Image (tube, rainbow, N blue to C red):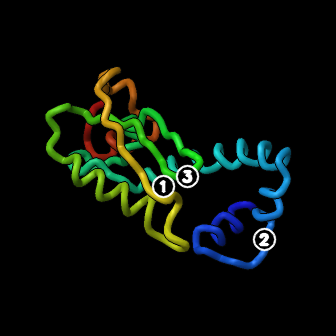
């Protein structure tokens, strides 16, 4: 029910909805905002699985390139991400795919905007790849 109402809000839906009623109650708002934030982070993480490393053909989540996701009160996502190499020239491609994954879709997408904070510490290594990512790499012929 909250997701639907958040979608209504993003689409500038003016009809009363559950979200509006929850915001009117301070205690409920605090409890619900924690739950909503957790759900939103999980939704963003899931959407980031549509962002594929152009060289390896595996999504950035399963490659372990997403180090953290934070969504502020303005519904702007900040993603702490790294690359397999600091010299990777494909940051623009990853940023474009992220824009499509997070900002497009019904009601304008999952978040209002996003920012990628490129980080280099800790350095990426094969130990960051998820089990699903390892399975995908093996299917492509990599020995991981």
* SS at badge 1: helix
The first of marks 2 and 3 along the sequence is 2
The CA span between labels 1 and 3 is 19 Å
Q: Which of marks 1 and 3 is nearer the N terminus?
A: 1
- Front tag of 1 and 2: 2
Describe residue 15's horizontal placement relative to residue 92 as left or right.
right
Q: Tell me which corner region of the image, top left, top right, bottom left or bottom right, holds residue 81.
A: top left
Which x, y percent locates residue 71? 54, 45
How far apart marks 1 and 2 lie (CA) works out to 26 Å
Does residue 91 lie above or below 12 as drawn? above
Mark identifier at residue 74: 3
Q: x and y percent of residue 72 in the render? A: 55, 45
Identify which residue is drawn at 39% across, 35% down: 64
Residue 17 got which mark? 2
Q: Where is residue 8 in the image (x, y as percent from the top left)?
A: 66, 72
For mark 3, give the secondary structure: loop
On screen, residue 109 versus residue 59, left or right, reads right
- Seen from the viewer's position, the closer of residues 24 and 1 is 24
In the picture shown, does residue 3 fall above or below 78? below
The structure residue drawn at horizontal position 22% and vertical position 52%, both measured from the top left corner, is 92
Q: Residue at x 83, y 63 (%)?
A: 21
Q: Residue 104 carries which label?
A: none
Q: Mark 1 points at which residue?
A: 47
Q: Residues within 10 Å of mark 1 (few under 14, many from 20)?
A: some
Quarter holding residue 27 = top right
Residue 47 % position (x, y): 48, 55
Q: What element carries label 2?
A: loop
Quadrant of the image containing the N terminus: bottom right
């Amino acid at each position: 029910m909250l997701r639907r109402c958040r979608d209504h809000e993003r689409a500038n839906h003016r009809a009363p909805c559950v979200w509006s009623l929850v915001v009117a109650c301070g205690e409920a708002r605090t409890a619900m905002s924690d739950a909503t934030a957790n759900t939103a982070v999980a939704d963003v993480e899931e959407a980031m699985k549509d962002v594929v490393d152009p060289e390896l053909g595996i999504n950035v989540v399963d490659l372990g390139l997403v180090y953290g996701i934070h969504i502020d009160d303005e519904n702007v996502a900040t993603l702490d991400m790294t690359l397999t190499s600091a010299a990777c020239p494909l940051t623009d491609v990853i940023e474009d795919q992220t824009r499509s994954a997070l900002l497009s879709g019904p009601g304008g997408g999952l978040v209002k905007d996003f920012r990628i904070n490129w980080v280099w510490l800790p350095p990426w290594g094969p130990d960051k790849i998820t089990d699903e990512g390892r399975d995908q790499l093996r299917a492509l012929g990599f020995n991981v």
